[in-house]
Image: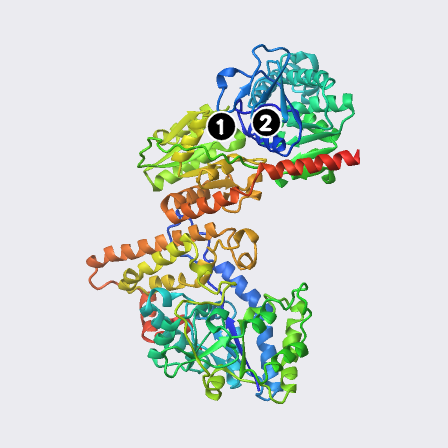
Amino acid sequence: MLGWEFPPFISGGLGTACYGLTKAMDRLGMEVTFVLPRMVESRYATHVKLLSPDSWTSAATFMFSEMKNVRFHAISSALQPYSTPDVYRRQIEETLRQKQKMQGGTISAASHLIRGDDYSRDMYTEVHRYAAVAAELAQNEQFDIVHAHDWMTYPAGIAVAAITGKPLIVHVHSTEFDRSGENVNQMIYDIERQGMERADKVIAVSHFTRSTIINRYGISGEKVEVVYNGVERNGNWSLAETGINKNEKIVLFLGRITMQKGPEYFLQAAKKVLEMMDDVKFVMVGSGDMMHRSIEMAAGLGIGHKVLFTGFLRGEDVQKIYKMADLYVMPSVSEPFGIAPLEALNHDVPVIISKQSGVSEVLMHALKVDFWDINEIANKILAVLKYPPLQETLANHGNFEVRKLRWKDAAAKCIRIYEETLVAV
Amino acid sequence: MPSVCFYFQVHQPLRLRHYTVFDQNDRYFDDYKNASICRKVANKCYLPANRLILNLIRQFNGRFKVSYSITGVLLEQFLSFSPEVVSTFDALAETGCVEFLAETYYHSLSFLYSRDEFVEQVNKHIETINSYFGQKPRIFRNTELVYNNDLAALIESMGKFDAIITEGADHILGYRSPNFVYQPKNCKNLKLLLKNYPLSDDIAFRFSNRDWPQWPLTADKFAHWISNVNGNGNVVNLFMDYETFGEHQWEDTGIFDFMRHLPHEVLKHPDNNFKTPSEVVQNYQPVDTVDVPHIISWADIERDLSAWVGNAMQSNAIHELYRLEKKIKQTADEKIIADWRRLQASDHFYYMCTKYFADGDVHKYFNPYDSPYDSYINFMNVLDNLHSRCSRQARAEPSFPTPKRNTTECFFDVGSQNKIPPDLQPAK
């Protein structure tokens, strides 16, 4: 299995998903070799025990004590975490624009120029370096199938599959259209499409994503299967005393603060809510390239004192914030799945989710809105805050519903797809 | 000699429009949607079904009989959106083979929350039916066939009724059959007619179900089942939504053809006949008393109230609604009172039902909202606005000891003296 990040070293839902899926596969007795592109720093040690070696070579092997059938390979590289594609994209686009200026606006010509050796230090190169090392590593490994998670690992997946002749499965947790709207980075799109085309099977995290794969990437529908994510239910957040004594309602935004997650709709809805109700705080947990703009926007709307930015939170802090929250809002513009609402429900926090999300396909006991409809978002936020029976019913039924979404089922479905693929080959 | 007693429930709610917390006006109802649904159902069901029933009555020279309960909220909609339906019901009334039943004008659950309000709504309904169809109903059916001993006692004390109709639920009957007339416990004169739910549901729910072993249901097969009651019952009470014909069961399922042939097949057997509820009550004496201490209804397998007040949202919404009663009535504002009453329709609470929600069954089919949560939010926003209208009026009162009245309000007042809103005055 080729992954990009793994808890606790995560910056988004991808790591959580890989963790849940791998752990469930482990329980089902599936042997997994998990290849990670980056070094693990021991200062992040949390409740998950790492059997980590002291010295890092170009490919270090280690295991999590709780997963007996999973071995991890970390490839020493300078790769940045998940959120960087956006940064890279902007850097590249900036360069591209400068280039266009110099060359008099020949866009198509310029986009050809961007390829290749000009940008030896960009993410694109790193992805290919990861591919090269992974391919080398694969020659000494025994496995039956290659499972690659998201575009950064597709070149590696293609390389490994090509060298070993094993079938390739690509798992689409998000697409370039989710991350960048219509302004897609052509390079990433090409990598994604190549990965999907070369794959024997494509796994999409929702029907929402499946239709993007079919419509935008021209992949045949027969090849694309939907496997919904699950949610990890660990009952060990016994934070009996959080020391929170609040007389204000708390509405939570938790996720990367990027265009894809719709932070500006959250803030505009917050403004509308505050016009009707005073004792509410809006908490934005996470970081991202829209964070500064969001802070400015909150100030510009005159609600700066009502909006708190906590930055990126981990582990117990996340649980604490869920414990405090009265409501979780996910106004994503385009969300392939969205695990966070499931985690909120796991903590008995009711959720408002955008209809433009994969998770809205599996959650019935959630309030659903169009991400752009700030009036309706505010309307629903106010309703949850004003009417305790609504909050209670949503939380109770939602919590119950989430229990049915198990990683075990997701893993079992992946294993079934493996078996089908192997038979077909 | 089983008599077949048909009673059709005729009702459409006034659906609310999308009403957010930011809306600050008193237009709560979705006129466009209500009009288009009313016209659609009129064309698919009410008009063709009424025509069919009328033809059957003529064809059998009065040997075929049915009864209806039409809610006041639907009559109002007919008058606004498809008045021709009212004249076809009137034509049916004139045959003398059609009985109209009484219920709460607003299709409400008021019996459970306010007895005063309940009695007012029943009286309003009786007067409305009388003014349109020239009959003073003698048989009462409560909204959703909600029933218990207390209801029977209240209805008997009103002194206007001969019988109540309710569900023939297994747990109130035990070993007994619904095919007899019963008497409610502690009642002296009032009788009880119980729905034969297996045979009613064969038509209303299972008629077009191809997985049902008895599909396709033909008129002679059904008539045979009715004849089987012979010797073990007096009356087969077939109670169902009128929308069964053409709306719940589409025309292409053959439901109209089934009905067209049914009277002939039933009357083939010389012992069989059709009777209206009042005729049933006059012809048959109660065989036993039925004790119903707990509330029953005709909904779902539970036959209880859980479809309307089963979760916290529903019970909150309905309690908040009836809590306003005093304030609302103090305003003496006809418009405010009418809006409050329209919000009492049981449908609004049914939409908030989370039972089976995830399975997407019958509850979903009749629901204009995407989710029960949306319906609760909408309802509470409207209720909030209604409340603020009362408070506003209450504040305005002291400054106007005799409130100024505009033409419209005077108009409404005239209507209230007749106990029928002006829009329901029979057109002369």
Which residue is disc 2 drawn over?
A67
Do the dots labelled 1 and 2 sit on one chain? yes
Image quadrant assignment for residue B379: bottom left
Which residue is disc 1 drawn over?
A257
Q: Return the chain for callout 1.
A: A
In percent of width and height, residue A174 lies at 61, 31
In percent of width and height, residue A11 lies at 53, 25
Residue at image point 21% right, 60% down: B400
Residue at image point 72% right, 20% down: A141
Classify mark 2: helix, strand or loop: loop
Asked whether, in this view, residue A31 is left or right of residue B319, the answer is: right
Is label 1 or label 2 in front? Answer: 2
Image quadrant assignment for residue B3: bottom right
- Of mark 1 and mark 2, the one earlier in the sequence is 2
Residue at image point 68% right, 25% down: A154
Q: Return the chain for callout 2.
A: A
Residue A219 shows up from this direction: no
Distance Cα–Cα, label 1 vs label 2: 32 Å
Crowd tier of the residue under label 1, counting other residues whose Cα lies within 10 Å: few below 14, some 14–19, many 20 or above:
many
